[in-house]
Amino acid sequence: MTFVILACALPQYKLWWPFFVVLFYIFAPIPTLMARRYSDHSGSSNSCLEAAIFITMGIIVSSYGLPIVLTRASVIESGACYLTLAGNTVVYATLIGYFLTFDQDDSDYNMW
């Protein structure tokens, strides 16, 4: 989040358009969480989980595409784009780490 806030608040940028990627951060894990909640863990292919992963990947690609499109349209500067892309990478790496840590069956942290 620090990179995204810096992309918006630094004096040379002064535009808050890159902050819209925060909506993608909120919406990205929701389809996967819902599909894992209502799916059976039988090991076979689950179309609900695959559709949720597809929607999640679409949200993630959109969050990387938004600052690039804003830069190409000359709405934000390239430095703000790079900071936003770095923030995206950190946030999504954290989400992946969360899902990998708390989805293990042998962990005591698996409360859900």
Image: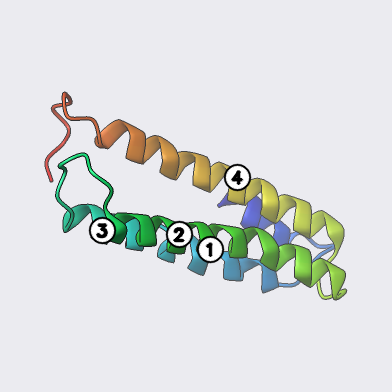
| Residue 14 in view, yes or no | no
Q: Position of residue 52 (x, y in %)?
A: 36, 60
Q: Are marks 3 and 1 in contact (CB under 8 Å)?
A: no
Q: Looking at the picture, does residue 42 appear above or below residue 33? A: above
Q: Looking at the picture, does residue 87 appear above or below residue 31? A: above
Give the alpha-carbon distance from disc 2 to disc 4, as whole Å: 19 Å
Mark toward the start of the polypeptide (3 vs 2): 3
Q: Which residue is mark 1?
A: 58
Which sits in the foreground, 109 or 49?
49
Label 3 amino acid?
Ala
Q: How is the image coloured?
A: rainbow
| Residue 32 in view, yes or no | yes
Label 1 amino acid?
Gly
Q: Which residue is mark 2?
A: 54
Frontmost of labels 2 and 4 is 2
Q: Are marks 1 and 2 in contact (CB under 8 Å)?
A: yes
Q: Which residue is mark 4?
A: 89
Label 4 amino acid?
Thr
